[in-house]
Amino acid sequence: MEGTMLLRALSFPASSSTLASSRLFFRHAHRLARLPKRQRLLANLQQRSLLSRRFQFASSVARPSIEMKRCYCTPSVRAIATSSAQPAPEVLGVEDEVAEKLGFEKVSEEFIDECKSRAVLYKHKKTGAEVISVSNDDENKVFGIVFRTPPKDSTGIPHILEHSVLCGSRKYPLKEPFVELLKGSLHTFLNAFTYPDRTCYPVASTNAKDFYNLVDVYLDAVFFPKCVEDVKTFQQEGWHYELDDPSEDITYKGVVFNEMKGVYSQPDSILGRVSQQALCPDNTYGVDSGGDPQDIPKLTFEEFKEFHLKYYHPSNARIWFYGDDDPAERLRLLSDYLDKFEENSAPEESKVGCQKLFSEPVRVVEKYPASEGGDLKKKHMVCLNWLLSEEPLDLETELALSFLDHLMLGTPASPLRKILLESGLGDAVVGGGIEDELIQPQFSVGLKGVSETDINNVEDLIITTLKQLAEEGFHSDAVEASMNTIEFSLRENNTGSFPRGLALMLRSMGKWIYDMDPFEPLKYQEPLKALKARIAEEGSKAVFAPLIEKFILKNPHRVTIEMQPDPEKAARDEAAEKEILDKVKSGMTKEDLAELARATHELKLKQETPDPPEALKCVPSLSLEDIPKRPIHVPTEVGDINGIKVLQHDLFTNDVLYAEVVFNMSSLKKELLPLVPLFCQSLLEMGTKDLDFVQLNQLIGRKTGGISVYPFTSSVRGKEDPCSRLIVRGKAMSERTEDLFSLINRILQDVQLTDQRRFKQFVSQSKARMENRLRGSGHGIAAARMDAKLNVAGWVSEQMGGVSYLEFLQDLEERLEDDWSGISSSLEEIRKSLIAKTDCLINLTADAKNLNNAEKYVSKFLDMLPNPSLAGSTSWSGRLPPINEAIVVPTQVNYVGKAANLFDVGYQLKGSAYVISKYLSNTWLWDRVRVSGGAYGGFCDFDTHSGVFSYLSYRDPNLLKTLDVYDGSSNFLRELEMDDDALTKAIIGTIGDVDSYQLPDAKGYSSLLRYLLGVTEEERQLRREEILSTRLNDFKEFADVLEAVKNKGVAVAVASPDDVTAANKTRPDFFKVKKAL
Ligand SMILES: [Zn+2]
């Protein structure tokens, strides 16, 4: 499955506004305990960064295209480094014998050159469980167990089960061992995903002892969970009736119930789900594995238990191990679990059938909740979807289709994307292009922000463009650019914060889960070579035109989805739900109601009672002795070239050079700040005098691994003025260093900022993206808004990525026609005040030889930069008024925040603050906001640069109640009792965050940000020591500090109109109401 692997979409939710990511959300991201925080990071790319983990995500605002949307997953760079480091033969022999003794039969074995790994496929003889054991020298070890779990209805069984099995098991009888692992392990990855047809439980760690602890907890959880014996977990994670007092109304509660309400409030998610269901009405994809909020309450505990008994069974399991640990140990651990089972019939029953192709196209119209009174004219969405074949495709075809996908849609210059956006028919492209993660591949593309009268025009335009591409083919420069981009990504193998072993597992699973060869998807070299040869011999048209003809144009299995905005839908859904609940209540006797109130109370009590210390001890943990005493070292040499500071990081990067060019933004006029993101996009997506933007984009694709430009802003501790920079990030193979810097120079200096038509598209796209973010990542918006009230850096960021930015865009759209020359000259003014040699900084990451090689090109680049006399820095000193605000949006769930600046009340930063805020997130806030409150997430975040401490909730059914929970944090800490074990776990978990695994480019980038923010090595060491020596007393002292948030904090909620009205009734004028959509 070259195709699958090459172009598998593994992006995180909210990272792009395409349909692909919204589908991934309900496909992948169901558990994501840490997701809210990460999402926030992603949502605020142009905002400042806190801890190291954040740094890896920084990417272009202007180019959410290929790098962000997709991860090309390939083998470990480290592994490549050591070339053919095959395990010694004697190790092999012993291992085979051990495997046999432990009850495993070796099915096949291969050395996979692409990842320099030995991969063995075993079958567990007694149960038929399949195991792949991959050995190489990657220290980031990965384990995953995957079950085929095709649902028959939309009650969300697989999803609720995925949540529930992690709530206590035979060996680990706690409320949530998962949370204990989050708190106290060094995991580099810990999560679970529900797909439409499978459920996946992966963990990763670089520490072997920690790794096996994680594996054991996960194995015990999936095979022996408590949730099948105790209905309370099902009620908590799935659904239950809640009634505090018989005089009140009954409501539905449940973590998944609420999570899915959030998903069903988002137009992009609705479109993804409707598309999938309409494309495959006859197999398991015709229902929603995540759960439809209307169907979830139909699920019974009996059905839930049966599903587990049948499908969470070794016979139905596929297990993956990867990394540099001892392969025999893996099998030893497994056999303990697998031996306890007999073979069952699940493999037959869980087979996923194919959808038969339609004989003619289908059309579906669906409504989505929109705000009342808003302009609904240009709010329609239309998306065309094709199911490409009746059977899974062969590797070569899938690879060619993925390539075609990149050619048509991969970059802003790709013809289908470009034509759709330039048509002016809509604001942003939807649909994920080619998707091949499920049994049959599909293709989707469409537009949102379309007016009703243009729906047919969009359809016609898509079809005409595809026809034209089939007839005329692609420009050879475009083909070369796509080829280089794909090859570069494969070679670089940059999976970001996602472990490489996990990316490989998901790729392999795409075929393995359907009983096909699991190794095939890992081997891309041969098919890629063959495809290249074919293109060279026959020309690209001969390769791609028949694909477009056969799979798309002549394929009758086409589904057109039209989505209409419906301002009454949210209210209607709510009324329908209330009607059902009223009926339930009226059917109950007085005794029933008293019983329900008692049960509600009992469930709450159970949720709020902490696990006893003895129980907590059963979750294995490392000891402080296992923790390195020093922070992770990143080699950094600060030198200068032509009088300009240059930071160099000598790290092995497989011959890729990573470069950042950093400019100071602090002399920019305040009123120009909101234009900066659009300025960045203009640099990359407008043309120069001699190249139009398509040619420029192709040139970047042909010569480099990508270039992005974005603003970065953060507070600097102890200073009023923020650090505000414009960062240009680029990467290329080392032999292309000259091209890389010459292209960066052209972008910065030669691009003509005069293309009104393209600029108009940027504005529409940005507006669409911000609106999407407001509904899907409201916690990020709330956080930015609070920050803007509490410090200057926050204010600057909010101007470029918050509600203020959205308002700016709305206004800009209005004046674009009349005042283009003014806007264009403002863009030019930004360029003049930012792009200067003065105060510029260069950051380079590569090995010594390649760093050396880069110096002469850097020098040449610097010589070409303008060197104007300094305008001097202006002081922005902006802040929003510190009042409570509710941003009203059409949604069924809320995002609730409260924050204050702790430095303003005299708090001096100590490392213990990291431990305490993490602990607070994983205990008090998790228990009260998520477990008993029913929100999908609740956490706190401490920005150690600005001093802003914020509480945030995610997809929350409550509003004021959540604020009360926040206010209870101080008391919780004050009364906290904690034994040494619990404290040690909290410390280790914090170190796990601080030391989070980073690929070399991320290491170099983190080091740059530390440099910019004045974080020294001495300070890192000091903080680490403070973290390691955190005592219970620190928690109590911090309780007093947090009183400031309770008493002086400012609250911002992104919430539904009804909930805000209700809140303002309970506490008169608590929120100032602001309508944003
Ligand atoms: Zn979930």
Image (cartoon, rainbow, N blue to C red):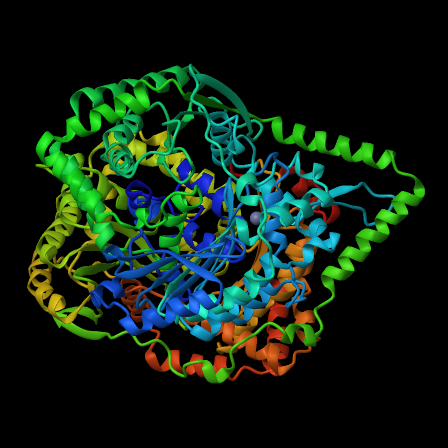
Q: Nearer the viewer, residue 415 or 509?
A: 509
Spot occupied by residue 206 in the image (x, y as percentages of width and height):
40, 70
Farthest residue toward the right?
590
Q: Is residue 180 above or below residue 431?
A: below
Depth order, front residue of 1014/5: 5
| Left or right of residue 371, residue 454 in this image | left
Reply above or below: 118 against 980. above
Q: Could you tell me if residue 936 is visible in this image?
A: no
Q: Position of residue 139 (x, y in %)?
A: 35, 69
Quick check: 305 left or right of 940?
right
Residue 672: horizontal and vertical position, in percent? 32, 47
Tell how many labels: 0
At x 81% / y 34%, what residue is drawn?
A: 582
- The picture places residue 241, in percent across and down from the top left corner, at 77, 44
Looking at the image, residue 1030 lies above or below residue 922: below
Q: Is residue 117 left or right of residue 281?
A: left
* x 61%, y 27%: residue: 569
Task: Determine whether 751 is above or below 105 in the image.
Answer: above
Asked if one can make out residue 512 in the rendered structure from this viewpoint, the answer is: yes
Front residue of this view, candidates 465 and 306: 306
